[in-house]
Each structure stands twice: as C-alpha cells, then as structure tokens.
Image (cartoon, helix red, strand yellow):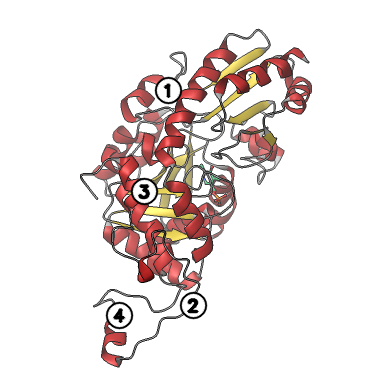
C-alpha cells in the first residue's frame, strides 16, 4: 500500500485479498467468536504467534479492514480502533498516564478532551498543563519542565487555531515524551502528523472519515509498540468498535479524497466570501492569508479542510437570526458530513463544558461553526447571502 496514492489507498486498503465467497465489498462479520478445529492453531492465534481472530472485543475481520485503511493513509506501522473518537482519546490518555505523570496540551482541544484534562485526569493525580494554544514558546517551556505526553490538536475546534507539529514534536522528543495528535479536522488527506514527528495520530472517525453522519468510531495509528499498548488497554476496558459501524466508516472512506478535495475548495470560497461581508465580524479559516496560523498551516497541510467558524457583528441575537434562516444546513452538532452542518460551540464542540469553562478556554459564545458539505458551493453561498440579508 505504501507506494500508492491516497485516493487508491482509501479504496483498496484492507481489501486487496479475496474475501470469503468472492464478495467485492467487505462482509459485515457480526460473529462474536471464531472457531478452530485444531487446538494448537487456536492457541497460537490466542497468544499472537499466528494471525487470526479469537473474540470480537479484541479483533474482528470487518473492523480490521477499517484499521488497515487508516494505517496506510497515515503511513503508520500499526492501527487500532474504538467505539467512538472519545474512546480513542480516553484510551490513549489513560494508557500512557498514571499517577505522578505529566501531560502538556492546549487550551483549545475538543470539548470532550478538555473535560478529561480539566476533570478526570487531575482526579487520578496526573499533572495537566494546558497552554495557550498558539504560544509555542510557552508550550516548549512547559515540555522542558518535564512531560510524559504531549497532546496536540490542529487545526483546533472551533476557532481553527494552528500549531506547529514538527516544532513541538522536536521539543518533546528531546525529553522522550510521547507525542499524540488529534487529526480529525485535517483528515489524513490534508495532513499526516506522523511524517511531522508525532508518535501517534488519532481521529474521531465519526466525522470526515465516515463522512455521512451515520456511524460512530475512533481510530489510532502510529508506532507499533505504542499502538499495542493502547490496544491492550482497550481490549480489556472494552471500548471496541463493532463490525456494522466499521463497515459504514470503511465504505465512507472510499470517497474520502473526493469529498475532502471538494470540501477544501468550497470552504476556501465560502471563507473568502464571508470575509468580504459587512455583517461578518471575523472569519476563522486557516486558508485565509489573514489567519494567524496561515504560514504554519501552509507548511504542514496540503489542503486547509472543510471546517470554519465566524462571528457576526451584533452578537448572539444576530447569530440566532442568521442560523435559523439558513436553509441548506442542519443546525446540529458534529461535522465532516456530506451535508453542511452549523451551530454555536455551546451546543456543538463544547457542549460538555460549563459556560465558565468555555470562558476560561476562550471559546466565544457568539461564534458560528460551519462544516462545509459536498453540495455545490454556489448554492451554499446563495443560502448564506439570504440568511445574512435577514439580519
Ligand atoms: C468529534 C470530535 C471528537 C470526539 O469524537 P466522537 O466520535 O464524538 O467521540 C474528538 N476530537 C475532535 C476534534 C472532534 O471533532
């Protein structure tokens, strides 16, 4: 798979060998357990001496197809999967962090991730330091003070801040910290953190990878021995991905490159359009030259993604009028779907947090998060225009 390009890998990853019965799509294998006639062979599979499946909480052939796709797309040695994106994140954090360890991260991580940093890890006597997201000097200084795990997310949710993966991974490597990057917003089509020095990359597969808002999952890819450590924890705590959602995500991934190319292009056009409107206050999109993270984004991303956010003059009252007048959009949480989705962070990315926690993390209450779908961009712009005219 290594020499193939990403569009090809998305289709063929995990699917190069003939499936039973000659099916040309991966079979959805709901079997909980796998039978062996030979006890010696069964034992060899159970201890990992021979490849195969024992019990679907550990591994499953349909789930393995999805894991193979993400492994190849991220250029990783190994990959594993979880019931949700938060399953991937919590399993990774808890597999590497025990009492007395120290994790350095950013103030702008996904709401659920922030909740783990703010509420759960401190309760286990794990030292958590959340830095100002774009203050690279501060992050480097905190890494130097001692750090077992550096956890990054870029671009961030919902203000699309960009952090320099290579620069921070270099600092973390010097003291032997494990570097983890949440690559959900960028997708492996636009950004490959492992090639920038990260040890592990994870995704909420619920978003762009699945692409159709009809299945939940999480994936983790990277160095084999590190992925194994998290896999062994997940096997036991049981946050395993089921065959049916794995099938849907793997199917969605076959069109990943097509969708992302379209979403990159449409988002760019919409961001430029919004930036010219009088009623719009600020547009947050890393592809705009005026975005503070533009130069870093340009150097580490091959496309700027389908996510943006913006604020309107006149605050939350106008946000309400605008959103309720949009027609080609679901006012709903989540992102990365074929249909356009929009909403304020207080009901989307940061719904898990209190208003006080959002304020502390600098998440504006009057922001609109806009996830560009694969509709024709001209139609989306007409829709935004008429919704703005209602203000
Ligand atoms: C949605 C999201 C998550 C959590 O994923 P779930 O599948 O909802 O558990 C984590 N990180 C980012 C950046 C997300 O957008």
Residue at mark 3 = 11
Residues at marks 2 and 1 touching, judged by CB atoms closer than 8 Å: no
Which residue is depicted at the point 56% across and 54% down? 215
Q: Position of residue 195 (x, y in %)?
A: 26, 40
Residues at marks 4 and 1 touching, judged by CB atoms closer than 8 Å: no
Which residue is depicted at the point 52% across and 14% down? 272
Q: Is residue 31 visible?
A: yes
At numbered mark 3, what does the secondary structure look like: helix, strand or loop?
helix
Residues at marks 3 and 2 touching, judged by CB atoms closer than 8 Å: no
Depicted 227 relative to depicted 259: above or below? below
Picture disc at residue 293: 1
Q: Which label's residue is closer to the chain start, 4 or 2?
A: 2
Whether ligand 1 has any atom under 8 Å from the Cβ at mark 3 is answered as: no
At numbered mark 2, what does the secondary structure look like: helix, strand or loop?
loop
Q: Which label's residue is closer to the chain start, 1 or 3?
A: 3
- Distance from disc 3 to disc 2, alpha carbons, whole Å, reads 26 Å
Q: Position of residue 338 (x, y in %)?
A: 56, 38
Q: Position of residue 371 (x, y in %)?
A: 57, 32
Picture disc at residue 45: 4
At numbered mark 4, what does the secondary structure look like: helix, strand or loop?
helix
At numbered mark 1, what does the secondary structure look like: helix, strand or loop?
loop
Residue at mark 2 = 32
Picture disc at residue 345: none
Q: Say which of marks 4 and 3 sits in front.
A: 3
In this picture, residue 137 sits left or right of residue 236: left
Q: Which label's residue is closer to the chain start, 4 or 1?
A: 4
């Amino acid at each position: 798979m290594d020499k193939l390009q990403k569009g090809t890998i998305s289709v063929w990853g995990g699917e190069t060998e003939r499936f039973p019965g000659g099916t040309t799509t991966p079979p959805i294998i709901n079997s909980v357990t796998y039978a062996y006639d030979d006890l010696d062979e069964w034992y060899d599979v159970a201890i990992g001496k021979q490849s195969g499946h024992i019990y679907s909480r550990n591994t499953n052939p349909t789930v393995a197809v999805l894991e193979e796709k993400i492994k190849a797309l991220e250029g990783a040695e190994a990959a594993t999967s979880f019931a949700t994106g938060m399953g991937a994140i919590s399993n990774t954090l808890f597999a590497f962090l025990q009492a007395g360890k120290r994790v350095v991260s950013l103030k702008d991580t996904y709401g659920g991730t922030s909740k783990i940093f703010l509420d759960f890890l401190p309760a286990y006597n794990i030292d958590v330091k959340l830095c100002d997201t774009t203050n690279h000097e501060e992050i480097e200084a905190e890494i130097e003070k001692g750090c077992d795990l550096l956890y990054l997310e870029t671009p961030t949710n919902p203000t699309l801040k960009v952090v320099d993966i290579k620069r921070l991974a270099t600092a973390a490597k010097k003291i032997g910290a494990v570097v983890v990057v949440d690559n959900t917003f960028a997708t492996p089509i636009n950004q490959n953190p492992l090639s920038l020095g990260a040890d592990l990359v994870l995704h909420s597969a619920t978003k762009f990878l699945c692409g159709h808002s009809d299945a939940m999952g999480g994936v983790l890819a990277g160095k084999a021995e590190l992925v194994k450590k998290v896999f062994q924890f997940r096997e036991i705590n049981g946050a395993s991905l089921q065959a049916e959602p794995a099938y849907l995500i793997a199917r969605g991934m076959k069109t990943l490159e097509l969708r992302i190319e379209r979403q990159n292009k449409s988002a760019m056009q919409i961001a430029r359009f919004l930036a010219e409107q009088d009623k719009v206050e600020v547009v947050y999109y890393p592809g705009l030259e005026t975005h503070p993270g533009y130069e870093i984004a340009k150097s580490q991303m091959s496309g700027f993604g389908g996510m943006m956010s913006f604020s309107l003059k006149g605050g939350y009252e106008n946000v309400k009028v605008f959103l309720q007048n949009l027609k080609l959009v679901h006012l709903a949480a989540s992102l990365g779907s074929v249909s356009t989705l929009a909403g304020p962070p207080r009901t989307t990315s940061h719904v898990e947090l209190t208003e006080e926690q959002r304020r502390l993390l600098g998440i504006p209450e009057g922001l609109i998060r806009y996830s560009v779908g694969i509709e024709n961009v001209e139609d989306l712009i007409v829709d935004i225009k008429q919704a703005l005219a209602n203000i």
